[in-house]
Image (spheres, rainbow, N blue to C red):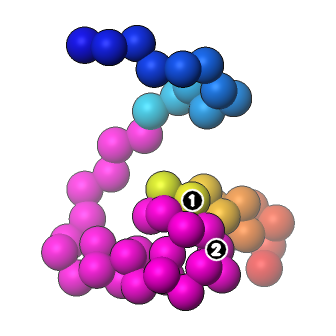
Amino acid sequence: MAKLPYTDRTEVFTLRISKKEKEQLAELAKKGRYGLTASEVVRALIKRAQMGR
């Protein structure tokens, strides 16, 4: 397995979601409000939940 380049994001989080939830994440990513990828959307939503919004 190739070594990934170093970033601040060194932790790996595995989440099981339904096909419908995966499609919803993709739709949110297409809108670009929370990020451009499903991973960015998940990160943004976690941060928002932590801030209490």
Image position, residue 43 (x, y; %):
60, 57
Residue under label 1, please give it.
40
Hey, what amino acid is under mark 2? Tyr
On whether residue 49 falls in the magenta region, the answer is no
At a point 33% along the width and 51% down the height, the residue shown is 15
Q: Position of residue 8 (x, y in %)?
A: 69, 29
Q: Which residues are magenta?
A: 13-38
Q: Residue furthest left?
A: 19
Figure check: 31 above or below 17: below
Q: Kindly identify the residue that appears in the image at 28 percent across and 80 percent down.
A: 23
Numbered label attached to residue 2: none
Q: What type is the residue that disc 1 sits on?
A: Glu
SS of the residue under disc 1: helix
Give yes or no for contact between labels 1 and 2 (Cβ–Cβ under 8 Å): yes
Give the residue drawn at x 55%, y 87%. 31
The crowd level at tag 2 (other Cα within 10 Å; few <14, some 14-19, many 20+) is: some
Q: Nearer the viewer, residue 20 or 26?
A: 26
The structure residue drawn at horizontal position 20% and vertical position 72%, both measured from the top left corner, is 18
2 or 14, nearer to the observer: 2
Mark number, residue 34: 2
Eyeballing the image, is 4 above or below 29? above
Going by the image, does 10 lie left or right of 33? left
